[in-house]
Amino acid sequence: MAVEVTTELGKIEIEEEVIATLAGAVAMECYGLVGMSSRSTMKDGIAEILRRENLSRGVEVRKENGLLHINLYIIVRYGTKISEVANIVQERVKYQLNQNLGLIIDEVNIFVQGVRGENS
C-alpha cells in the first residue's frame, strides 16, 4: 500500500518499502546502533542482525487514521544508554523522513531486540 502525498503540482505515491528502507538507513547512521533486527524472526531468543540490503525488514510502516506510524526493531551496542540511543533514532528518523519525503510522521516506535558488543 502506497502513501500518497498531494502537492500543488500533483500527487506523489511513495511505496511503504521505500519509507522503510530510508528509515532503516537513517537509523543505522545513529551512534550506539549495532544493526536492525527482523521484526519476525527470533532464534533461541537471539535477534538476527540484518544486512544493509535487508534493512526494510527491520522496519514496519503503518497508516492509522491517516497518520503514519513507524516501528523500528533495533539492536543496541553494549555499554550505550539504551534510552538515549532510542531517542536519537526516533528524532533522526522522523526528521529525515519529513525532509527527504515530505511525510508527517506521527510516531516512531522503537523495539530493542537485543544488545551486542562490538565484535559479536
Image (spheres, rainbow, N blue to C red):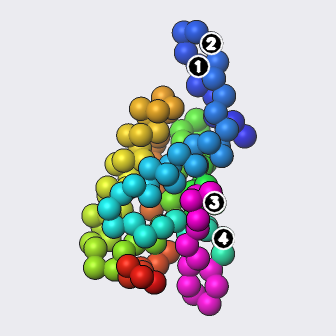
In the picture, residue 115 is in which quadrant?
bottom left
Give the mark, 3 or 4, whose residue is nearer the N terminus.
4
Name the residue that disc number 4 marks. Answer: 40
Give the mark, 4 or 2, whose residue is nearer the N terminus.
2
Q: Amino acid at mark 3?
A: Asn
Contact flag, marks 3 and 4 (Cβ < 8 Å): no
- In three-dimensional space, the C-alpha distance between marks 4 and 2, rounded to whole angstroms, equals 37 Å
Q: Quadrant of the N terminus?
A: top right
Q: How busy is the neighbourhood of tag 3: few (under 14 within 10 Å), some, or many (20 plus)? A: some
Q: Is residue 115 left or right of residue 24?
A: left
Contact flag, marks 4 and 1 (Cβ < 8 Å): no
Q: Amino acid at mark 4?
A: Ser
- Where residue 37 appears, as percent x and y from the top left, is 55, 69
Toward the right, the furthest residue is: 1
Q: Which mark is residue 10?
A: 2
Name the residue that disc number 3 marks. Answer: 54
Give the mark, 4 or 1, whose residue is nearer the N terminus.
1
- Where residue 74 appears, as percent x and y from the top left, is 48, 67
Q: How busy is the neighbourhood of tag 1: few (under 14 within 10 Å), some, or many (20 plus)? A: few
Which one is in front in this view, the residue at disc 3 or the one at disc 2? Answer: 3
Which one is in front in this view, the residue at disc 3 or the one at disc 4? Answer: 3
Give the mark, 1 or 3, whose residue is nearer the N terminus.
1
Q: Does residue 16 belong to the magenta stretch?
A: no
Using the image as rendered, state which of residue 40 and residue 54 is in the foreground.
Answer: 54
Q: Is residue 46 left or right of residue 105?
A: right
Magenta stretch, residue numbers: 42-55
Q: Amino acid at mark 2?
A: Gly
- The image shows residue 72, relative to residue 4, as above or below, that is below
- Where residue 43 appears, as percent x and y from the top left, is 64, 85
